[in-house]
Amino acid sequence: MSISIQHRRSANQTLRIVCPNGHLGFAPLKTGSFRIGLGSDPDLICADSGSCDIGPGPLGGDISSSPIAWQTHDLEQMLLGARRLGVPMIIGSAGDTGTDSRVDLFVRIIQELVCRHQLPKFRIGWFYSEQAQSAIAARMQTGETIAGLDGRPNLDAETLSATDRIVAVAGVHPFIALLEAGADVIIGGRSSDCAIFAAPAIRAGFPDALAYYYGKILECASFCAEPYAGKESVLGEITAEDVKVTALLPAQRCTVASVAGHAMYERSNPFYEHVLGGTLDMSECVYEQYDERTCRVTGPRFLPAGELRVKLEGAGKVGERYIGMAGVRDPYTIAHIDQVIQWARDQAREQHGEGGYELHYTVYGRDGVMGELEPMRDRPGHELCVMVQAIAPTKHLAEEVCMTGLRQMFYARLPQVKGTAGGVAFAVDEVLPASPAYRWTINHTMQVDDPLALFPTHVTDAGV
Amino acid sequence: MATERLFGLAKTIRSKNAGVDQITFDVVFRDRATYERVLRSKVLSKEAVCRIFRIAPERITDHVEFDPALAIKFTIRRLAPSGSPGDADMFGSQQYGPLLDVEVPG
């Protein structure tokens, strides 16, 4: 078997990238395998920092879901490593969402780290991804279609106006533009995960298909290796013929099974990945074990798009939110829990009117986790926990509706109930403020002529 | 060969968001023989998945046999986007439970 790519480049023309974290900030990178990565002759250090998994709240409310201490930790590790080696560092989808404020936050953290460590001069570049609602409304008024993804209807004016914040998902283009401008450190707004890694490879002249695949396989760091371990670094190498990826944590390996398995992770179809500019086709990929801990992949194809369409993500606030919880042990009440909930809903309607708020009941012990997908919802457990969520335009109303929706379960009138001193059990007889409720309003695509147009880039000097 | 639960036959059984409007399921096997046995049994066919989750076929957006990973993969459209008020599984990561008990004929 070949010598591990960790210790030696496998060809004359290669580009090597270390990825230390699949979602920078969500949990801190592990420094042991990252240090091994820094010692493995990387040409760049790159990581994605975004995810839609955290729900619509952070985008809508323009906050991070990751603590600033963990974001700073990872940025510091990467920055110090990259500057010591004199290689570029690229971050995409800054601060979980890639909004303008998150890009500014990461640029500010980098500048503070520069001062703290008295780093010598370098160039820092960044780009923005946020889109004004008015600009999209103007396009829709000219009859342009903002096409729905994943079975969604096309965007209408009402849904757009219910949206608080919108980001467009960048492809490789702003990253390449910033590398061309001499940026040593790049902080990206919202971007396709694979574009962060594909951009330097495409700029270095490697084929598009291999470059996008390279990004696809590196973007989740150690999730493409086995056994399962998060937040560990992996090393990738692209050549003119193939992509290789190797695990850097000594206990992990990149195998055919782990790398092929990763190709389908978190995606509806394992064969196709759509980015701004085209589609990566992985249906003919061939996976081989290259050395003990390295997988080699050949055969991806890239189909350039006839029309450039950029993905838009948007979130809108539904309202302020309070939650409450009640337990149930009486078997008769458990069997009739829907009637109990209906009673409480009716009481809320009597007190607060028909609309203007939302009341949601999650019945743990019956179908709380899976809802309508639960095959066993007709076989509830011997005790239930009911979570009540009330959402309303004001905190005051949300609190009141939640209190009604919770406490009226206590007073529900079931004809044959034996217990007449309270229908549910309270661990706390109060309702609790929760984060405001948001929803994903936009998961659509929009036509663009210039793939850079929506992503303004900036470069400045940093360092002392 | 005796009938066995998928729990004992699969290496990985998981669910996860695929974007904000879909949940995707991966059932991954250790060896080709088991993978092909489960495929042949059709216990995870599109029709079977509809029965397990009691959904209409239109809810399944993708159903793929992914040979390189020895995996059967299918994707279900959510009724409301992830993290919407009332959604109790924002990551879609706990929807695979019913698959563990699927019986695979010998």
Image (cartoon, coloured by chain):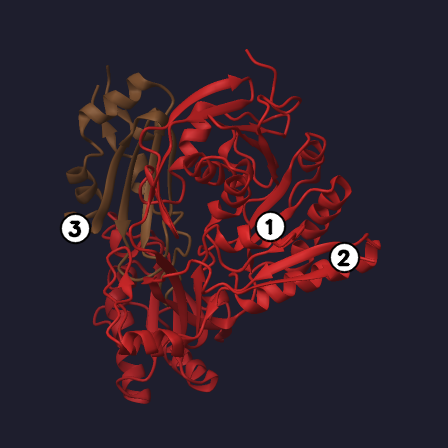
Chain colours: A red, B brown
**Along the line of sight, which residue is nearer the eye, B97 or B24?**
B24
Q: Which mark is residue A95?
A: none
Identify the chain of the residue marked 1, using the numbered disc in the image: A
Q: Which mark is residue A179?
A: 1
Of labels 1 and 2, earlier in sequence is 2
Q: Residue at x 50, y 41 (%)?
A: A202
Closer mark to the observer between disc 2 and disc 3: 2
Amino acid type at mark 3: Glu
Relative image position of residue A436 (x, y in whole percent): 47, 74
Amino acid type at mark 1: Leu
Quarter of the N terminus of chain A within the rendering: top right
User: Badge 1: few (under 14), some or many (20 or more) residues near its Cα, within 10 Å?
Assistant: many
User: Badge 3: few (under 14), some or many (20 or more) residues near its Cα, within 10 Å?
Assistant: few
Q: Is residue B2 left or right of residue A178?
A: left
Q: Residue at x 72, y 46 (%)?
A: A77
Q: Residue furthest top?
A: A1
Identify the chain of the residue marked 2, using the numbered disc in the image: A
Closer mark to the observer between disc 1 and disc 3: 1
Relative image position of residue A201 (x, y in whole percent): 53, 39
Relative image position of residue B93 (x, y in whole percent): 40, 47
Gap between marks 1 and 2 measured at Cα? 21 Å
Q: Are marks 2 and 3 in contact (CB under 8 Å)?
A: no
Q: Which residue is mark 3?
A: B58
Amino acid type at mark 2: Leu
Gap between marks 1 and 3 measured at Cα? 45 Å
**Along the line of sight, which residue is nearer the eye, A224 or A11?**
A11
Q: Secondary structure at mark 1?
A: helix
